[in-house]
Image (cartoon, rainbow, N blue to C red):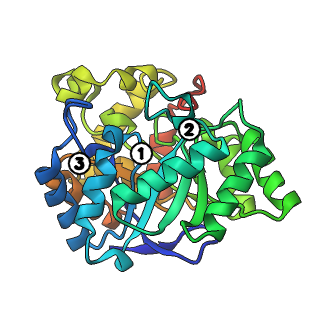
């Protein structure tokens, strides 16, 4: 395993962050692993040197946090744990979502209880809240740090101007600034390169992209996607413009380069991200120990500048996706 410093936090994290959306309950989404299989996969991740774990209160309605907490029981100090809040947890309670002070405080407390922890290393807002003043959200997050319930705060997909406003608010009022940005970024979705990633580089904000494999689109030839359980049941895959803007040709070039290097398509797609200086640790979600091991092996794949250019060349601008 390789390690890197996460933005300006001083935290040393594995170059692979294990995404925990895959753990919890198959009642939530068909492809999600139940507890026993989830614990096995997390255990293998730890064996491989992964020390960075990303979950959220909404994943399996809290079950993901509970499984992760159980897996880390007795070895919490060696892990960097990130969770998120924003999406409504109780359809009958409008204050169980959003970024009001009440929502942030009560949902953080609920997350900590499920995790079995006193403090989470990174508390992230899962999206931008148009209905709550920026200063209200930033003060609530700052209080979470001052009270010792979170060590750092981060954000996730939003417009760059929104992120800049929130960074400016923290600077203006002397509040805890965002240390990380968890955004949508992969070989077939590169719109973040226009504004968000340069902003993060300028502000020394750590970048931990979600969906680095485009929800599986970059793991196999595009014509085979629907043959997988996730491909046939995961409606979110088709909301993103992976097949647009040169996506199919990029998929084919990933397959071609994988064959040439004796690697798997997922490894080539991850290696491309590892070669991007503004990426700290892509968030890799998997339901397979084998695929997790493949992801770690991708750290050893060397792409030349011409390889990178060949993979990127077919890309064309696509509609912005992932902020919803």
Please tell me the numbered disc located at residue 264: 3
Which residue is drawn at the image coordinates 23% and 53% (left, top)?
263
**Residue 218 at least partly seen:** no
In the image, 300 versus 124, the foreground residue is: 124
Measure the C-alpha gap from mark 1 to mark 2.
27 Å
Q: How many marks?
A: 3
List the single residue furthest toward the right: 172
Of the image marks 3 and 2, the number of the one nearer the N terminus: 2
Q: Secondary structure at mark 3?
A: loop
Q: Residue 214 placed where, x, y %?
A: 39, 36
Q: Secondary structure at mark 2?
A: loop
**Residue 3 at least partly seen:** yes
Q: Does 192 sit above or below residue 116?
A: above
Q: Does 315 sit above or below residue 302?
A: above
Quick one: quadrant of the C terminus? top right
List the single residue furthest toward the left: 36
Q: Residue 22 placed where, x, y %?
A: 27, 44
Q: Does 279 sit above or below residue 14?
A: above
Q: Secondary structure at mark 1?
A: loop
Per the image, the residue denoted by label 2 is 190
Per the image, the residue denoted by label 1 is 57
In the image, 34 versus 314, the foreground residue is: 34
In the image, 17 versus 122, the foreground residue is: 122
Quick one: quadrant of the N terminus? bottom left
């Amino acid at each position: 395993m390789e390690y890197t410093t996460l933005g300006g936090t001083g935290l040393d994290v594995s170059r692979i962050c294990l995404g925990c959306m895959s753990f919890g309950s198959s009642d939530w989404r068909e492809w999600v692993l139940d507890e026993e299989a989830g614990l096995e996969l997390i255990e293998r991740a730890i064996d491989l040197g992964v020390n960075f774990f990303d979950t959220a209160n909404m994943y399996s309605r809290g079950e993901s946090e509970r499984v992760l907490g159980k897996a880390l029981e007795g070895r919490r100090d060696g892990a960097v744990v990130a969770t998120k809040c924003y999406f409504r947890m109780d359809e009958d309670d409008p204050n169980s979502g959003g970024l009001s002070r009440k929502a942030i405080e009560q949902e953080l407390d609920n997350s900590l209880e499920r995790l079995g922890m006193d403090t989470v290393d990174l508390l992230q807002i899962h999206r931008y809240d148009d209905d709550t003043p920026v200063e209200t959200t930033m003060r609530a997050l700052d209080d979470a740090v001052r009270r010792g319930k979170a060590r750092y705060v981060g954000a996730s997909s939003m417009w760059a101007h929104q992120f800049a406003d929130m960074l400016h608010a923290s600077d203006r009022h002397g509040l805890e600034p965002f240390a990380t940005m968890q955004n949508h970024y992969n070989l077939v979705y590169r719109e973040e390169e226009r504004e968000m990633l340069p902003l993060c580089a300028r502000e020394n904000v750590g970048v931990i992209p979600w969906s680095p494999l485009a929800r599986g689109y970059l793991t196999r030839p595009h014509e085979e996607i629907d043959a997988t359980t996730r491909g046939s049941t995961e409606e979110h895959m088709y909301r993103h413009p992976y097949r647009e803007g040169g996506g199919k040709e990029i998929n084919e070039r990933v397959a071609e380069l994988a064959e040439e290097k004796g690697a798997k398509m997922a490894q080539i797609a991850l290696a491309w991200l590892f070669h991007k200086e503004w990426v700290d640790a892509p968030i890799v979600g998997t339901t397979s120990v084998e695929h997790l091991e493949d992801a770690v092996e991708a750290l050893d794949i060397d792409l030349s500048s011409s390889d990178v250019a060949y993979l990127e060349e077919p890309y064309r601008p696509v509609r912005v996706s992932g902020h919803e």
